[in-house]
Image (cartoon, helix red, strand yellow):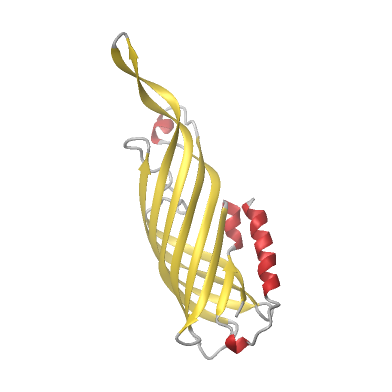
Amino acid sequence: MMCRFSIALLVFLLSLSSVKSQDSTRSFTLAMRPFHALVGGYRMDGEFKIANSNHWVQVGGELYSNSLSRYSEEDRSRSRRSLRYKGQGYGVSLLYKYYLDPRRKGDRFYFITGPTFESFRFKYDGYVWAPFQEDGLVKYRRELQPLEDRLSNFSYSTAIGFQQYIFKYIFVDLYVGFGLKKAIFKSDVVKKENPFGNYLWDPGRTGTFPVVALRVGVLLF
């Protein structure tokens, strides 16, 4: 679903490039990140010029909807039963972008940095100890119930990129760098360990992480 929507949006962006305007007056771009669709995400960035031609601000928004499997610590020690999570989330970012050669138009290198906030909810069916009464006594038994894990991520990233125009008003750019992230994990299950922070690209990993992004966009006005 996200992949088809991203393709349709890309076609829409390309159609916007037919808007008539002079290059010198254009100071707003709109771009998407197509590879986000491979992991159930949809990301759009809008950029506008400040001060002079080499200072820009990028405002980004992201939606996420996907399923993934993880093992809990208890599952690892027993039958390694995989938990199937249905995840949904969103993210917002505010980045400062500086073109390294303000005299050059079109294809050029840039520096980009700024904070990002992300929020995720993962729903699944898991076993918990539930109370019940028997012979006047309160006892506990394991029951399968709908549960939810929640993630809140605060990160700051810095990268170097290159932007290239493939048509008059249509560009692609690629940037690479690194970031620092703090993930806050909460769960319906008491004292549950975070299952989303074990791997480098996991959404709930705290620490440093690589930044790689490919954007396709259009210079609007």
Which residue appears at 57% of the width and 67% of the height? 214
Q: Is residue 77 left or right of residue 53?
A: left
Toward the top, the furthest residue is: 135
| Residue 16, image quadrant | bottom right
Whether residue 112 is visible, yes or no, is yes
Residue 96 at x, y percent in the picture: 44, 75
Residue depicted at 64% across the width and 50% down the height: 1
Question: From the viewer's perspective, is residue 9 above or below residue 218?
Answer: above
Instruction: Where is residue 138? Give x, y as percent.
Output: 30, 16
- Above/below status of 32 relative to 196: below
Residue 6 versus residue 26: which sits nearer the camera? 26
Which quadrant of the rendered structure holds the C terminus?
bottom right
Position of 115 compared to 170: left or right?
left
Numbered label tally: 0
For residue 218, side relative to residue 149 (left or right):
right
- In the image, is residue 23 above or below residue 121? below
- Which residue appears at 36% of the width and 46% of the height? 185
Residue at 65% of width from left, 63% of height from top?
9
Extreme residue toward the bottom, this view: 103
Residue 50: % across, % down? 46, 82
In the rendered image, residue 87, in percent from the top left (x then y), is placed at 50, 45
Q: Is residue 99 visible?
A: no
Q: Nearer the viewer, residue 14 or 180?
A: 14
- Quadrant hosting residue 24: bottom right
Comparing 107 with 57, the one in front is: 57
